[in-house]
Image (tube, rainbow, N blue to C red):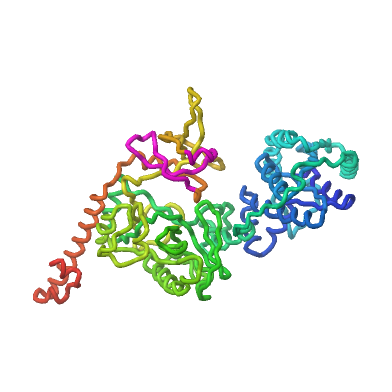
Amino acid sequence: AGSGKTSLADGLVSRLSYRSIGTGDYLNALRHEDSLLGRFVDSNFTQQGLQEIGLFYIAEELRKCKQLGQPFCLVGAKNVKQTEEVHQTIVDHGHQVDVVIELVVSVDTCEKRIHNRPVDVSKPRKDDASSIVRKRLGLYNNSIGQVRNFYKSISTVRYISVDADNLSQEEVLNFVIEKLQAIERIPGANATQQESDDTRPRVSPLKAAEVKQLIWELTDHHLNQHGKLNRQCFRFPGNQPGALNSSTIDNLREHISKQKVVRKLDGQRKLAVIWEQHLYFLSRSLEVECFPFSCDKQWERILVDGELVDLDCFPRLTFFVFDCLSYRGRNRCKENLLHRLDHVNAFCESVSRQNGTNSIIIEPQIYYDIDKVGALLNSGPNPVREDSKLPKSASLRVPSDGIIFVPKTIPYKMGFSPLVYKWKFPEMETLDFAIQWRVDEYQEDYLELLSVAIKGTRQVYTCHGTLLSIPDILQEYHDYTVVECLCGTNSSQFEFYRVRDDRSQPNATWVVEKQLAASVVSKEEIIEICALSSSNSAERVLRYHTNRNTSQVGRYLPDALSRRNY
């Protein structure tokens, strides 16, 4: 900020016909657009979440340079990670880096230049605020050594350092041009590299940003509790149930009669929104997938929550919907569960007519009364048997690692919900950890398992133990990859279950500590609690009808109760 990078790039454009590529100016222009993408960039401008958009812009500009045979100057990244990503993007598009120019300028000079910079009142630059400038320069000074070493390690790159503190912009430009003219083009192995032939369908970072912004606006997730713009939107807005164990079972027992139960399918948790004849999925790691999708116009911009399943028993990918967050442009999160399920059932019934032609099958997840818990759990984690007395449903063909209790009368709460409980079969009880590679005194590799806590702007990791054995599949994964681990009898050693590609963060430290401190609730105890509540409900119904007309109990009792000899 204020070092003269953009001015130098503009000079190279005018004097040498270079093409200037600068993500800062591009993002600043975007954030002033009244569009989903513009609002997304504006609300997250000071966060570390816009790299993908910047890389996409760089890639598009590099393609144009390739087509026109035009040289380019790119205003560089701020740290070594961004530098590596930008460099790889350049190489992937058939170019090479010939020269790197470092402008050496003091912090005071940078601040003075920014203070004297002409300001467009209608389009102020947020990153020109004094506090942000100081922070950016501090971060840059801490990382410039790594960036410098990265480029100096590449034998084909020439490095030019300019003491720009005591030179005018014109003098800096003349000095750089003189150096460039003295450098002959260095042939490189990457000069003839072709663009990637990867033809897999992808969602561009620009469209992904628009989808995220749309989802946040449909749920008012972009606003804080006071209705003001939330500057930290990069969170998955789905509901996260609490664990049902010995520390929470009494709360469930007290409110068991108000619960509905749904099977916890062994799939990938997604939010799905229909927009412009496409179905977009948002994962918990905030990745966006897109599929063409045909349906009635009334379902445009409906936002639903569910599990994406890929099993041989279904002809295509199948999305099981278990909640509705927005419908007809209105946030439905404040409605109770039964009202939200009305929207889910209407949506699934309507789109089922296109299930034969769409690339994604849409099915409703079924909620059950608590008297069905025994039948749900009798099959264990396996699909429910076809001879079960439960109503037929496609979701019963999917393996399940437990059940979720959802109160019928509460709204949908984004983030952790202490009133929604998930119970897993004890043999399927798991935690999500980040891994960190370590070497012991015998030079053997082992993996530490970490949880995370947010303290201010910092992420603090806590180690809870190690992986019992390291499977071959993990050899290719780096530090802080999230893995799901089975909780065994040893509280400090865990067994690997699977890699969580759909998660970017492990479980929170308080979640892990609470779960490890509590004891597991058995399947038999869950069934007993639900059966007792069902029995009490039946007795209350019987007492009501008996008091009303003792001679016609059978006439007034529901068929289900009559069959049970109440």
Q: Give the quarter of the image for residue 108.
A: top right
Asked if residue 61 is among those painted magenta in the image, a careful observer would answer no
The answer to whether one can see residue 464 in this image is no
On screen, residue 372 versus residue 38, left or right, reads left
Which stretch did the figure color magenta? 472-500
Would you place residue 409 above or below residue 352 in this image? Answer: above
Closer-to-camera residue (414/500): 500
Residue drawn at point x = 62 percent, y = 63 percent: 36
On screen, residue 192 versus residue 251, left or right, reads right
The spot of residue 346 in percent (x, y) is 42, 73
Q: Give the quarter of the image for residue 212.
A: bottom right
Would you place residue 298 above or below residue 538 in this image? Answer: below
For the view shown, which residue lies furthest in the top direction? 441
Closer-to-camera residue (8/542): 8
Asked if residue 496 is among those painted magenta in the image, a careful observer would answer yes
Residue drawn at point x = 82 percent, y = 40 percent: 186
The answer to whether one can see residue 73 in this image is yes
The spot of residue 159 in percent (x, y) is 80, 36
The spot of residue 182 in percent (x, y) is 90, 39
Residue drawn at point x = 12 percent, y = 73 percent: 553
For the view shown, which residue lies furthest in the left direction? 551
Would you place residue 181 above or below residue 437 in this image? Answer: below
